[in-house]
Amino acid sequence: MSLFIASLNSGSNGNCYYVGNETEAVLIDAGISCRETEKRMQKLHLSMQKVKAIFVSHEHSDHISGVPGLSKKYKLPVYITDSTLTASGLPIEKNLVQSFSAHQPVTIGNLSILGFPKFHDATDPHSFMIYSNNINVGIFTDIGSLCKNVIRHFKNCHAVFLESNYCEEMLAIGKYPEFLKKRISGDHGHLSNKQALELFLKHRGKKLTHLILSHLSKNNNRVSLVKEIFETHAGSTKIVIAGRYKETEVFCIDSNRQSKKINKKPSELQLSLF
């Protein structure tokens, strides 16, 4: 059984990542509106009826703004830590709130979702690993430094959404105020291109087929720069840039390193995925 993954949006204007198998799926964060989420999933021929839950990484608005609408309309449980729920003030129906704890996997059908703490300027931020039938997918964004947990899980990924937020030189000479530059580049801020590349070069495992570079800064990075940096060292790993204004393609991740882009008519896709 394969896993199907896509970024619906990635950046400071909204973050939402889809991971699922043939029978169920989850969203990691929902930082775009319910209507926009539906629109992008429809373009990808993905069914909201397969989405069984939303997992929230932290309380910043670009990760949670669409959570109430999606949860209410589709009666989706929202997995969120108690501290993050309090900090977010999200108006979620009480019966749909599900707390999770670090390092304790949540089982949804044939998916297992594991949250673990990360370094970011939020109340109780978490990264996620999603497992299904020996396939491992990571969502590592909004992290200021490469902790042991990130490195350990990264080594075991078949595919990973990895933050490559800013170019150090562009940030340094840019127009942001000094306090914001320090916040972004600090240990509880975001990963630079250099830090993301270091993780990729030093710790990628033989399983890694897809590296989806995510949460690129609009003002302190360039898509062309990130592609050049990573494709030079890609080897057999496919490099994908997650966009700020549109969804990626749906990628099929297989445990035997066979992977492919999903590009079928809606009727064909319905049969193959669902």
Image (tube, helix red, strand yellow):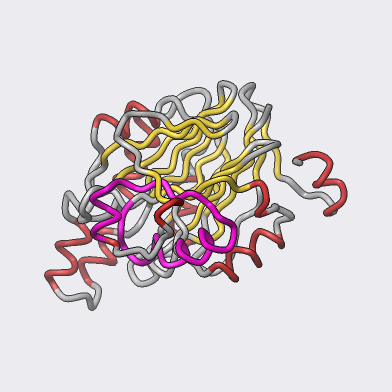
| Magenta portion: prevailing SS class | helix
State the residue in front, 18 or 56: 56
| Magenta span of residues | 58-87
Residue 127 x, y percent position in the rendering: 35, 42
Residue placed furthest toward the front: 95
Q: Is residue 267 left or right of residue 248?
A: right
Q: Is residue 100 left or right of residue 264?
A: left
Q: Please tell me whether residue 85 belongs to the stretch shown in magenta.
A: yes
Quarter occupied by the C terminus = top right
Residue 61 x, y percent position in the rendering: 35, 66
Q: Is residue 261 left or right of residue 219?
A: right
Residue at left offset 70%, top offset 39%: 260
State the residue in front, 164 or 41: 41
Quarter occupied by the N terminus = top right
> Please, is residue 179 above or below residue 232 in the view?
below
Q: Please tell me whether residue 134 belongs to the stretch shown in magenta.
A: no
- Residue 200 quadrant: top left
Residue 56 x, y percent position in the rendering: 39, 51
Residue at left offset 45%, top offset 64%: 68
Residue 119 x, y percent position in the rendering: 22, 45
- Residue 87 quadrant: bottom left
Query: How many numbered discs, if any?
Result: 0
Residue placed furthest toward the left: 179
> Please, is residue 169 above or below residue 194 in the view?
below
Residue at left offset 29%, top offset 31%: 149
State the residue in front, 145 or 129: 129
- Residue 257 quadrant: top right
